[in-house]
Every structure is written in structure tokens, then in C-alpha cells.
Amino acid sequence: MPFVHPHILYGIELYANTFSTYFKPLNVLYNKLSRILQNCRLQTPVAHLYQEYQTLPINQLFILQILTLVHTFFTVIMSYLKSIEIILLLIALFIAIAPDKRVICISVVFKNQ
């Protein structure tokens, strides 16, 4: 799994934001690979597989990566805004998660004085 995990994370922000019908084969393959690597039977719950390797399902990895990206973005922006006289009136971060766990919208609003 340590060799597979970085490959799954690479570009997850792009390929995981798709319809669940396109995404399902990758998810099934990831679960199958987890069962093979852990020598578990088909009836083993998926949650147990993820717990054993201390990882998350791909759809939750996608959400984690998006939130990490947003956090990094705001950390960098805030480090630049510390020493200037811009008054930050409103920061609105809307992350709307659709029923199939896709990120719909991320928006940031800054206002200069």
C-alpha cells in the first residue's frame, strides 16, 4: 500500500471530481487491492481495511486533499496580508458537497479599502 497511496493521491483533485459512475471502478479496484495486500477475504468490511493501513477511502481522501489545498492557500495569503493595510472585510469559503461527495464550489471574497 505504501507504493500505491502516492499514486492514488497524485491528481486526485482532478480525477475524483467526476460522476460516481466513472469513479466507481477505481474505488472497487482500490478496495480489491487493499484486500489482496492484507490477505483478507471478500467479506472483510472495507472500514477494517482502511483502519489497518491508517488511510481513508478515495472519496474522503479527495475531500481531505481539497481542504488541505484551501488551508495552504489561505496560509500563504494571510502571510502576505499581515504587513499591508488591506482591511479584510469578508472571507467567505463555501464548499458545497454534493450527495455523491463532489466539491461543487469554492469561493473567496476579499474587499480592499
Image: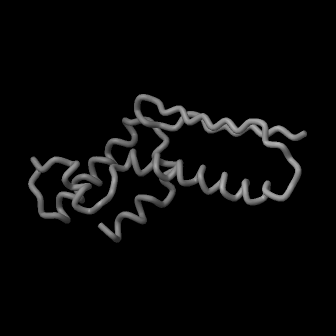
The residue at the point 25 percent across, 52 percent down is 31
Residue 109: give x, y in percent of width and height.
74, 37
Residue placed furthest toward the bottom: 3
Residue placed furthest toward the top: 99
Residue 49: give x, y in percent of width and height.
21, 55
Quadrant containing the C terminus is top right
In the displayed structure, 86 sits above or below 49; it is above
Snapshot quadrant of residue 91: top right
In the displayed structure, 2 sits above or below 36; it is below
Camera-side residue: 55 or 74? 74
Quadrant containing the N terminus is bottom left
Residue 19: give x, y in percent of width and height.
44, 35
Camera-side residue: 40 or 86? 86
Left or right side of 95 for 92: right
Please give the count of numbered marks on the rendered protein. Answer: 0
Left or right side of 72 for 8: left
The image's colour scheme reads: one colour
The residue at the point 41 percent across, 28 percent down is 99
The residue at the point 66 percent across, 52 percent down is 74
Snapshot quadrant of residue 40: bottom left
Left or right side of 85 for 36: left
Left or right side of 94 for 56: left
Residue 83: give x, y in percent of width and height.
84, 59
In the displayed structure, 38 sits above or below 109; it is below
The residue at the point 78 percent across, 37 percent down is 89
